[in-house]
Structures are given as structure tokens and as C-alpha cells.
Amino acid sequence: MKAERLWNIRFVQLVLIEALFQFGAYMTNPVVSGYAVALGATIAVGGVLAGLSASMALVARPLTGWLADRLAKKSFLLIAAALFCASAFGCALSSSVAVIGLFRVMAGIAFAFRSAAVIALVSLSVPAERLGQAVGWTGIAQTVSCALGPAAGALVIGAAGYPASFAAAGVLFVIGFAVSLSFREPAGAAPAPRPAKPAAPRAAAPGRPASGPRAWLERFIYLPNVPVAVMAGLSIVPHGVAVTLLLTAGELRGIAGVSAYYAVYAIAALVSKPTAGRLTDRWGTRRVVAPALVVELAATVLLAGMASLPLVLLAAACMGVGQGSAYAAIQAQAVRDVPAHELGRASNTFYIGTDIGMGFGPMAAGAVLQSWGVGAMFLACGGLVLLALGILAALRPPNPTT
């Protein structure tokens, strides 16, 4: 039976686990390329290493999606923590670029395991009517880590070198493993028993074959979440582009102090995510996501026409409120009313969309920036937000709270 309070012991543990995993990752992910270059690799090789973790997370998701509802979700937390520990300490102890690449692959697989478990367990650990609020608070761990993790990693590197930054992250992952070990699974977290031999094949629902490509795909993907994953992937692209290319865009426009964007974005997202989650519980997903995407669209227009630092900071506030709110609400919808035995695949499917958006969005945006400039790049991002709005309008809510 689920706890009646939002901040019960299980939820507190899950927020702490997410914070430890995310902070450790943000201490190391931004410095991998610099570490590789310091060891003698080219900048191009450093860039490949920097992208290995996200790429491997995407590649591993079909496997973790298949396993997600066959293994206990606590097992996923422990596997993720163990892989994170091995990756961080392995990078700290290695001086070979190739070996560090293998450990970064391990970190990507760890992320795939972690994302198939955390939000699924959150949905089982809090009251159903407060799920949106819970997801919003969980998302704060990522926002704070994004804002402070790279700075913490840089401080450690300045004081003791690159290996020390990975070792410090490893200590956080060890603590995360300990908290995961003490976590007690809520009802529904264990995998459903599978009959050895079904008595007779079930009849296929109208329009849905019992076997074939769709049945094979359903082993890895929670198909009802595909539109949700696409919407999340489209709406996260402007954030990914701002994270990777805004400083370059500011230089091209001759604007100083653009790095302040990230602090303003983090503050706005910190305030908006729990609020958006609470409003989603009261008003439904559609009524929160639609205006949030409109605010995000305004942010892309401001960035396309940015000519001064105040415009950049206004765009940061709009992006934090718009993208932060939309992400929290869509993520909650990805696990809302999903049967317990399918929560792992449902959560995993959601993250496939965001992996693609964060991974390939900045790549395409870089080509647009080089060919057509800053304005075209951010207007293209705005077009993707409009497409997400179109998907939201086309979705038929399964229940009145959607």
C-alpha cells in the first residue's frame, strides 16, 4: 500500500539517490574531453569521449527496457550504482584514453539502468494524486546538479587534478549504492510472476495482433508512451542547444556575460518544476504543458533575436519556466496510471525521446548555426516546440486528468 504522505522515507531516499547519481555525473561528464586532451588525445577524440556516455545510454535502453519489468527495480538501482562506481574509479586510476573510453561506455549503461528505475519507483512510493509534484521535486536534483556539478568538478581539478574529480564522483556513487542497498521496495516493484506455460493463447484485441513486429517491439518499448517520448524529445532540444552552443552564439553576436544564462535558467527551473508538478496533479497534464511550451517557444524567439545580455537573461527565465515545467509534467504523465508491471519500460521509453533530443539536437543545430547563423538555429528550435504542441493537441487523453 502506498504511503499517504509525499515526503515518506522511500521518496526521500529516491530523491537522495537521484541527487547523488546526477551530481557525480555532472562532476565528470563536462571534464572528460579535457582529461583526454591532457592525456595526449586530440580535441576530436576528446569530443567523442564526451559523447560516449549519452550515446551508450541510448543504445542500452532497448536491453534495459526488456529487463526493466523482469527484474526487481531495486536491482536496477544497485546495478546502476555499481556501474557508476566502477566507471568513476576506473577513469580516476587509468591513464589510457582507450580504457577511459570503455569506462565511459560503462557510465552510459549505468544511466540506462538508473532511468528505468528511479521514476518508476517514485510512482510506486507516493500517493497517485501527488505524482506530478513528486516528479517535479525529483527533477530538482538534475537541475541543481547541472548548475553546481561542473563547478564542483572544476574546483577539484584545480586543486588536485582530473583523477581527483573522478574519484570524488566515485565517492558520491558509493554513497548512492549504500542508500540504494537500504531502500525497501514498495508494493508492485517486484517483477510479476510469469507462467511457465500459458493454457491457451489469448485472443488479440481488435486491431492489435498477438504476435509479429508489434509484439516483438513491445518487449522493449512501452508503445503508449511513444507520443509522450517524442513530445519530450522535441521540447528538450532548445535546452540542449542552449547548454552546448549558447556561449558560441553569444560570441558571434558580440554579447558579453552570456554564461549568466545558466544561473538564471537553473533558478527559474528550480522554482517551476515542483509548481508544475503540483498544478499537473490538480489541473491535468494538458493544461500545464500547453502554456509551458508556449513560454518555451517565447524563449527560442528571444534567443533568435538576442542583441543584449538582458534579452539573454529574459530568455533564460522563460526557458527555465517553460521547458522545466513542460518536462516535469510530461515525465509524470509517462508513468501516470501505468500498470506496475510495465513501469520500467514506460519510464525507459520516456528517456529514449530525451536521449535523442539531447544527443542529436545539438549536432543538427551546430550545422544550422554554421550555415545560417544564430537566428536560424534558435528559430528551428522553436519549430520543434511548435511540433511538440501539435502532438499535444493531437493526443486523446485516456482520462479527464490527462
Image (cartoon, rainbow, N blue to C red):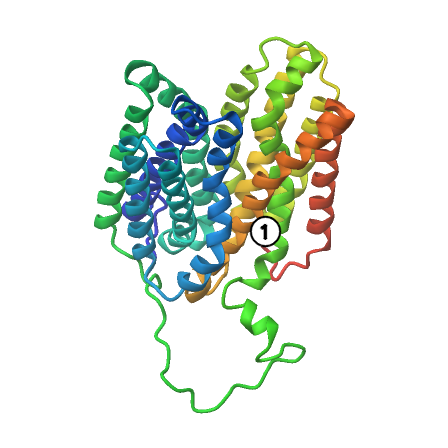
Q: Residue 43: x and y, percent?
A: 51, 25
> Which quarter of the image is occupied by the N terminus?
bottom left
Of residue 329 and residue 73, the one placed in the foreground of this image is 73
Q: Residue 324: x and y, percent?
A: 55, 35
Q: 39 above or below 189?
A: above
Which residue is at a point 28% across and 17% down the rendered structure image? 160
Q: Which residue is mark 1?
A: 229
Q: What residue occupies the far bottom of the structure in this picture? A: 199
- Residue 138 position by quadrant: top left
Which residue is at a point 28% across and 42% down the rendered structure image? 86
Q: Residue 288: x and y, percent?
A: 61, 42
- Specify whether residue 251 is in view: yes
* Crowd band around label 1 with a 10 angstrom C-alpha radius: few (<14), some (14–19), many (20+): many
Which residue is at a point 39% across and 34% down the rendered structure image? 25
* Position of residue 78 in the picture relative to residue 274 (left or right): left
Of residue 374 and residue 287, the one placed in the foreground of this image is 374
- Residue 306 position by quadrant: top right
Q: Name the element at disc 1.
A: helix
